[in-house]
Image (cartoon, helix red, strand yellow):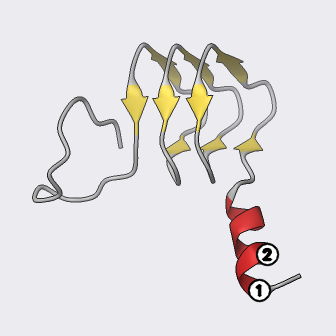
Amino acid sequence: MHCCAATAAAAAVHRLGAGVKVINCVLMDGVVVADGSHIQNCVVCSGAVVQERATLKDCQVRIFVGRNSGCSGPVLV
């Protein structure tokens, strides 16, 4: 396998902890949802981490990219 293809395949893996509930959500590449977290009606963007025992509903989660990134809307870090 070509090295770039291996990297792309590895990036697509999600890590879901024990006891996680994911209902009606979009999880993009490389998302981590830690143990005991419950997320519902959320979009979790690439590389974002939902911390242990978090409860999220009706939101967007993405990694922090800085104030001058041009991003708008609610951001949970």
Q: Which mark is residue 6?
A: 2
Label 1 residue SS: helix
What residue do we see at 21% from left, 31% from top? 73
**Is the residue marked by circle 2 packed among few (<14), some (14-19), or many (20+) residues within 10 Å?**
few
Looking at the rendered image, the quarter that the N terminus falls into is: bottom right
Label 2 residue SS: helix
> Is 66 placed left or right of 17 in the picture?
left
> Is 76 placed left or right of 49 in the picture?
left
Residue positioned most to the left: 68
What residue do we see at 35% from left, 43% from top? 77
Specify whether residue 53 is in view.
no
**Is the residue marked by circle 1 packed among few (<14), some (14-19), or many (20+) residues within 10 Å?**
few
Instruction: Between residue 4 and residue 11, name the one nearer to us.
Output: 4
Q: Where residue 76 appears, x then y in whole percent? A: 34, 36
Q: Where residue 59 appears, x then y in whole percent? A: 39, 21
Q: Is residue 8 above or below residue 61?
A: below
Q: How many marks?
A: 2
Q: Is residue 22 above or below residue 29?
A: above
Tell me the kind of residue under disc 2.
Answer: Ala
Instruction: Between residue 10 and residue 35, name the one nearer to us.
Output: 10
Tell me the kind of residue under disc 1.
Answer: Cys
Q: Looking at the rendering, which quadrant does residue 38 occupy?
A: top right
What residue do we see at 70% from left, 81% from top? 4
What residue do we see at 28% from left, 36% from top? 75
Residue positioned most to the bottom: 3
Instruction: Between residue 15 and residue 7, name the one nearer to us.
Output: 7
The residue pinned by badge 1 equals: 3
Residue positioned most to the right: 1
Q: Looking at the rendering, which quadrant does residue 62 occupy?
A: top left
Specify whether residue 27 is in view.
yes
